[in-house]
Amino acid sequence: MSAQPMWQKCAWDPVYKGIIKALRWDNVQYRDLWGRLQPLIDQFGKERVQSATWYLLYYEGQMSTCPSPLAKVTFRREARGSCRQILGPAPDDKDYEEFYRVNNRIPPWPVPKKPEPKKPEAPKEQAPVGYTEEEFRNFDLHQVEGLARRGPELLEERPDADEHQRQTWLVNAQRAKAELERREKEARSGILPVPVPEGEPLAPPVPKKRVKEGRSQEDYAADAKKMTKRSLLCALRDARKKVKQHGKRSFAGKEGKKELAAVEAELHARAIVAPPPGEETKEWDDKKKPKKE
């Protein structure tokens, strides 16, 4: 047996018809739903009423176990036409007010207020788009004079131009004249920068290379004088390794060369022969080795 269509259920099934009459077109919230349907539950049973609400009603969280108490309960879209046969048109239908007026009846629900048509906004006046004062300061003298002279000429040559364009020409001409007056005052006061000849753009300043400074030779010599013999030989070893590892042209290599020169000079002053590379601390390394029995 095929399932009954929605209109047939709403017209002949007492549970469907009872739910429609209980809720009507009211703005029912979920917390009030089962209170209104309690008489139907007592008469037909909870399962039958719940089954009918699934096909008739919709509310947010219907599939969850705990819907929001403030969720709005409405008739499903496919059921609204069948509900209209029993309740009449809904308040949000287009013919709601006309339906009750023709039948000389008072609408059971207040007629919703129609939104007032928006008044057309007056077209905003476009602000004149001209060069700013900062831009005029970066123009050369020839460009500023051309804008000051060309603005009034364009106003006469182009009478058919729109008002926005005419205002732009006028503003550019006024600002160009103000810029010429400013430059003239600065030239009289002697603070105007030296003009660059045409065809010779001003070259950007060459950034100076940042030279990394190290310690002076005197600093290394002063440190070497304070060292003991063992400390001098250790410093000699470290300086040789630094020069060999980093090279003579790198910053670390140059510092190693200065330190090496200071240590060798101090060894010469103390009449100590500089040992060959790799044997700077041999005297102490031999003492650390365990003696063979």
Image (cartoon, grey):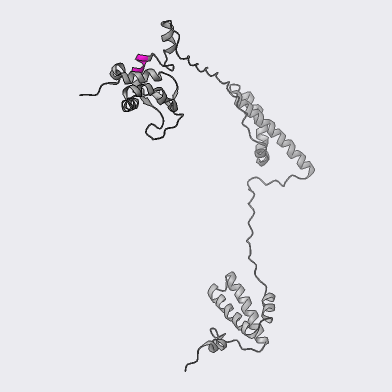
Q: Main secondary structure of the magenta part?
A: helix
State whether residue 206 is above or below residue 164: below
Question: Which residue is painted at 74% across and 36% down in the image?
Answer: 181
Q: Is residue 82 magenta?
A: yes
- On screen, residue 107 above or below 140: above
Residue 142 in the image, given as x and y percentages of width and height? 66, 38
Total marks placed = 0
In the visual, does 187 lie left or right of 280? right
Q: Nearer the viewer, residue 95 or 250?
A: 95
Q: Nearer the viewer, residue 212 or 116?
A: 116
Q: Position of residue 93 (x, y in %)?
A: 41, 16
**Location of residue 131 in the rendering, given as x and y in whole percent from the top left corner:** 64, 35
Q: Is residue 149 visible?
A: no
197 horizontally vs 6: left or right: right
Observer-nearest of 194 and 223: 223
The N terminus lies in which quarter of the figure? top left
**Magenta-highlighted residues:** 81-86
The furthest residue to the left = 1
Question: Where's residue 15, x and y in %?
Answer: 32, 21
Kindly identify the residue that appears in the image at 63 percent across and 77 percent down.
Answer: 259
Task: Identify the residue at image location x=75%, y=39%.
Answer: 184
Instruction: Tell me which residue sits at (60%, 75%) in the image.
Output: 256
Residue 264 appears in view: yes
Specify the quadrant of the image occupied by residue 50.
top left
- Residue most extreme to the bottom: 293
Question: Which residue is most to the right?
Answer: 189
Q: Which residue is the extreme one toward the front? A: 42
Q: Judge from the rendering whether residue 7 lies leftward or rightward of residue 184; answer left or right.
A: left
